[in-house]
Image (cartoon, rainbow, N blue to C red):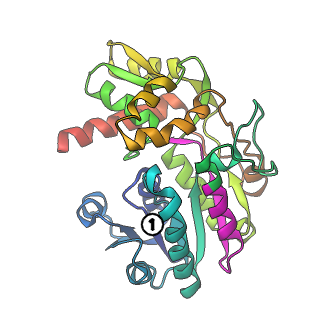
Amino acid sequence: MKRALVIGASGGMGYSIVKELSRRGIQVNTFARNRVKLEKLFHNDPNVTICSGDIFRLVDLEHAAKDTDIIFQSANLPYSEWEVKLPIMMSNILQTAEKHDAKLAIVDNIYAYGRSRGKEVRETMVKNPNTKKGRIRLDLENMVMQSNVAALIAHFPDFYGPYAENTLLNYTLSNIVEDKKASFVGNQNIAREFIYTPDGAKAIVNLSLREQAYGETWNIPGYGVVSGKELIQISREITGFQKGVSTVTKNMIRLLGLFNHQMREAVEMFYLNEDPVVLNGEKYEKLIGPVPRTPYSEGLKHTIDHMKRSEVSQ
């Protein structure tokens, strides 16, 4: 790989993929709508070329993908736009990859698996989504695998890390960093899985460099499972935070959904806080080796330090 395109480069996983590619000396075209944000994130990186545009305009995507070998798709949309816009977005990306004869590496979530019933999830598990959003993700997966593009799909648990702003943990950490009363979404005693975005970036870049990875789906687990209480305690030890951390329940989100469309869309995904999906990474380990795994104490420290620096620079 000499040059890659990262779509959604201003988001948490996209940012980390750009940094990982650049660290390996690979030239990167970064694509997102907000050019100012892209320039702020990457203006000091000699390996990065800024390409802003609209993902729904083929001409913008095709311009950004010029001379690239691999396209990393890490862009996302608000839940309320998924049903109508995600298929159009993926169609544009597939057309662009095919036109430029580029491979495609896709960042995906765990929604298509559906309920795990307490079992560790392997790639061989039949995907049986129990939500509308899970069915949409499975439809996109089928669209990709039935296309003429050499593609791989990597399933990740919830993110945390630098610039991973639209995430469950960021919702909690942002208030802790500002020393405000915080909230945690879901039962704080239930252990679930999160992934530090630089770890996820290393894993998907490693996969993208292996021919055997294409035409396959891959699970990229985090650093084991951890409860909300444990995450909050680690964050307290890092920051000295002493205020309370309340629990956001499903009924609270349902109530907020009466006034907020995005919250209304989020209700059906709350099952992940009650019956967590935990990924098995043995398939990755057989092809590549150990999955990159940063301990939560270390990943949270780096994330919180980054949030504090960003707060000061604003």
Q: In the image, residue 53 lies at what x, y percent? A: 33, 73
The residue nearer to you, when weighing 159 against 282, is 159
Q: Residues within 10 Å of mark 1 (few under 14, many from 20)?
A: many
Q: Residue at x 56, y 38 (%)?
A: 268
Q: Is residue 308 left or right of residue 257?
A: left
Is 134 rendered above or below residue 213?
Answer: above
Magenta range:
136-159
Q: Is residue 290 magenta?
A: no
**Image quarter of residue 215:** bottom right
Q: Is residue 207 left or right of residue 165?
A: right
Q: In the image, residue 55 lies at what x, y percent? A: 41, 71
Asked if residue 210 shows in the view, the reply is no
Q: Residue at x 27, y 21 (%)?
A: 180
Asked if residue 33 shows in the view, the reply is yes
Report the residue that reaches farthest toward the front.
Answer: 258
Q: Residue at x 33, y 12 (%)?
A: 242
Q: Residue at x 33, y 70 (%)?
A: 46
Q: Which residue is mark 1?
A: 7
The N terminus: image quadrant = bottom right
Q: In the image, residue 111 lies at what x, y percent? A: 62, 46
Q: Secondary structure at mark 1?
A: strand
Is 267 rendered above or below residue 134?
Answer: above
The C terminus: image quadrant = top left
Q: In the image, residue 211 lies at what x, y percent? A: 71, 72
